[in-house]
Image (cartoon, rainbow, N blue to C red):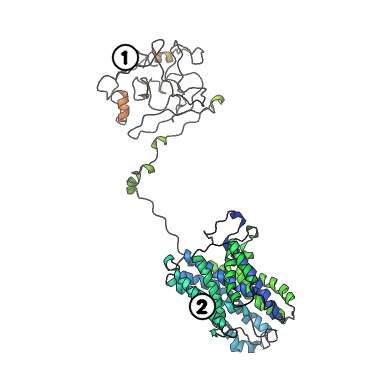
Amino acid sequence: MDDARVVHTRPEWFAEPHHGFAWIRMIGALVVIYGHSSPLAGTGDLFPSDWPLQPDEGVLMGFFAMSGFQITESWVRDPHLGRFAAKRVLRLWPPMLTVSFAMALIVGPMITTLSAGDYFAANGTWGYVVNNAGLLTLKHELPGVFLDNPWPNAVNGSLWTLPMELIAYAGLYALLLVGAAKHRYRWVMAVALIGLIAWDRHLEQLPGSESAGSFFSVPVESLVAFLVAFAFGVLLNLYRIPLSPLAAGAGLAVLVLMPNSITGSFWMTFAVSYAVVVAGHFWPSRLTVPGVWVNGSYGVYVWGFPIQQLLAMAGIHNQWLMLICAAPLAYCIGTLSWKFIEEPTLKLRHYFTPAPKKKEPEPAEEDLDEVDEDPEDLDDLDDLEPEEPESVTPAHEATTKRRPLPRPPAPSPEPPRPGRPGGRPASGPSRPSTPPGGTPRPAGSPADAARPGSGTPRPAGPPSDAPRPNGVDRQRPATPPSGTRIDGAPAPRPDGPQRARLNGLPMNGAPLPPARTRRSAEQRPPRLPAPPPDESVLAKRLSGDLDAGPPPARPPARRPGGRHARPEPPPAPAEETRPVRPYPKRQDGQ
């Protein structure tokens, strides 16, 4: 259980609250064994009667306060009456029935003063099992068992608080029916606590112990006192009362300083109840152990008394020796009870746990159009292109960062292109811009899109520095006319079929459409036939097919020598270095 009210500044110092409560319950069960050692050994009370804080009584108060706090948390998480009742039955009955059957049917026949036949024929034997199964009708005697002990005839006196806990569950169940767990009706629990306090104070004034009688086998005076602690634990949870170790310590200090009186007994209920709840939330994490070692507190509690009676029957009459022998045996049997009885039965709770909510179904295909209308749900289709083929990158270019060039937006989906913008520049000499089939690209083709901010056309598809799918590297559309490369070395002149191709003749001698050559600024690119039907309107407009008149008057950029200047790439940031430009700047005089 996790409580949002407690925000630890160093959460790694503290264990989870449910683990802290398990530790406190185990320590409390061992303290109860310690408190029973003296009367069962026949040496009187273990604690002086003038002590204002009686440890065994305070431990029982703490048990009821923790039950009220944790059970309320269970209801808040799953407010279902049927499941709530089933969980309480699975928690309370199995360990109690186990120890009752074991003592009546296994241990009893072995230690009884009667014969086996007389023992099983006696009504008290089966009455012990039936009455204990009813819980409210507890019976503590078995025929011929523990007759000569210092505390005679009592088989298991620790069971006397279980009917009180069952009544506490029933009272909380009734209050939850009227909505006491809801924020607006939680005042009902406060009224119930005030009524229990008034009743307890009235019974405290009556002369004699347990003078108020009993309800079935449950003494009323003790019942009301423990119900006050239980209701206070419920109220701590419902009202989210702050949990402070300083306040808990101060309350216990005041209790120690008070005399053993009616007022001290009343204050002990609240001081101890608040302290155990705070201790569960502030339990140190370094004491965290596997749950199996501390979860068997219920088994330790219900098995401790019969083990001590057996030790007393064996002749142990010293309270400290009784404690030294009984505590380890009770702990071992309680741990086995948790492992093989309580834990398996508690796992049955998943049959009462509500099924998890189903996830909302995915939208059908006919509903995708409505979902896609939201711009935030749309994918960037321009990024969904095939991956680039692997290519060898020189070492000096391996870490070069290059900004992808802008590309005109396409109004309609186009087939994926073989390259991605911003590819790596290829090393080696530049090659003519010739398709793999051997035919040069016609001038003014749709692939020659105008670059923004320049009068010179540029490819509209992948940039010229992107590697070709078939391995042909295309870095520049044409060899520099000056016959030199960008690094100053003489460029190889095309000859043979390549030269014929550049001169406008194909390799097989057939005439080619006029190749794109260097032209003056006044010339207009020739028009092409109608593009294929799958090309976009933007490609048609860029190719000139949709031009109604002469191109817009835009003075072309010139360089010395009267030739068109190659468009320069966008200026790079000052902190970024570019050893190789994707579109190198031409040298003067070319």
Which kind of residue does numbered mark 2 sit on? Ala
Residue 59 is drawn in which quadrant? bottom right
Which kind of residue does numbered mark 1 sit on? Gln
Q: Identify the residue at the far left of this view.
A: 548
Q: Quadrant of the N terminus?
A: bottom right
Whole-percent x, y for residue 458 in the image: 38, 22
Q: Is residue 339 visible?
A: no
**Looking at the image, which residue is at 53% across and 69% down?**
233
Whole-percent x, y for residue 133 in the image: 55, 80
With respect to residue 502, does 195 lie above or below?
below
* Residue 94: numbered disc: none
Residue 175 is drawn in which quadrant? bottom left
Question: Are dots 1 and 2 in contact, CB under 8 Å?
Answer: no
Whole-percent x, y for residue 39 in the image: 69, 80
Q: Is residue 465 left or right of residue 65?
A: left
**Looking at the image, which residue is at 34% across and 25% down?**
446
Residue under label 2:
198
Q: 463 or 534: nearer the eye? A: 463
**Looking at the image, which residue is at 62% across and 58% down?**
285
Identify the mark nearer the N-term, 1 or 2: 2
Q: Quadrant of the C terminus?
A: top left
Q: Is residue 359 left or right of residue 43?
A: left
Q: 492 or 37: nearer the eye? A: 37
Q: Secondary structure at mark 2?
A: helix
Residue under label 1:
523
Kindly report the distance in space between the C-alpha atoms of the residues bearing marks 1 and 2. 109 Å
